[in-house]
């Protein structure tokens, strides 16, 4: 009987010591607008300072066989503050040349 009481007491102690689930971060603003031809505008802001904005536009490009086709060109940015309180931001373009981010946080290759 003493063993059962000890086991129950140990389980209660473990349950009380477990970390509580953090509160979900509240969304302050969330906008999305889809355009009929395929473009879009998107914006998001949360209470912890995360911000993201993005615009997608349709562009006609030629493929390897020189045939035109439509692609979505994306331009955007996001920013946040890390746990130490330092701000970070990234701007980017994603197009037929790939994803091209720009930020002071991204190491740059030395110039030759």
Image (tube, helix red, strand yellow):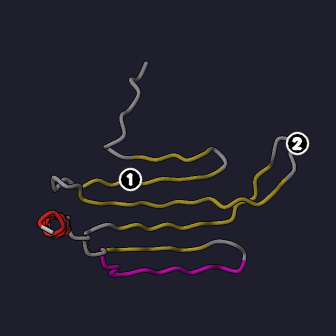
Q: In the rendered image of this protein, does residue 55 appear above or below residue 95?
A: below
> What x and y, as percent, mark residue 72?
66, 61
Cα separation between marks 1 and 2? 34 Å
> What x and y, as percent, mark residue 60?
75, 58
Which residue is rendered at x = 15% and y = 63% of the image? Answer: 3
Q: Which residue is mark 2?
A: 65
Tell me the crowding category of disc 1: few under 14, some 14 to 19, or many 20 or more residues within 10 angstroms, Cα based.
some
| Quarter of the picture holding the C terminus | top left
Residue 40: image quadrant is bottom right
Q: Is 29 covered by the magenta stretch?
A: yes
Which residue is rendered at x = 28% and y = 53% of the image? Answer: 88
Task: Name the one closer to the observer, 82 or 18.
Answer: 18
| 1 and 2 marks in contact (CB < 8 Å) | no
> What x and y, as percent, mark residue 45?
35, 74
Task: Name the one closer to the observer, 7 or 66.
Answer: 7
> What x and y, as percent, mark residue 28?
32, 81
Tell me the crowding category of disc 2: few under 14, some 14 to 19, or many 20 or more residues within 10 angstroms, Cα based.
few
Which residue is rendered at x = 62% and y = 59% of the image? Answer: 73
Left or right position of 87 against 41: left
The disc, 1 or 2, on the residue closer to the chain's N-terminal end is 2
* Helix, strand or loop: magenta stretch: strand
Q: Which residue is mark 1?
A: 90
Which residue is rendered at x = 19% and y = 53% of the image? Answer: 86
Q: Is 67 covered by the magenta stretch?
A: no
Q: In the rendered image of this protein, does residue 98 appear above or below residue 16?
A: above
Q: Which residues are magenta?
A: 25-36
Dot 2 lies on which element?
loop
């Amino acid at each position: 009987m003493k063993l059962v009481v000890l086991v129950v007491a140990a389980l209660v102690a473990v349950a009380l010591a477990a970390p509580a689930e953090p509160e979900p971060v509240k969304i302050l603003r969330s906008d999305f607008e889809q355009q009929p031809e395929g473009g879009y505008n998107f914006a998001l802001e949360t209470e912890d300072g995360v911000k993201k904005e993005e615009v997608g536009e349709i562009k006609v490009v030629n493929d390897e066989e020189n045939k035109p086709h439509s692609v979505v060109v994306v331009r955007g940015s996001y920013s946040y503050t890390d746990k130490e309180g330092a701000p970070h931001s990234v701007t980017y373009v994603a197009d037929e040349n790939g994803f091209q981010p720009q930020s002071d946080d991204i190491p740059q290759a030395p110039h030759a």
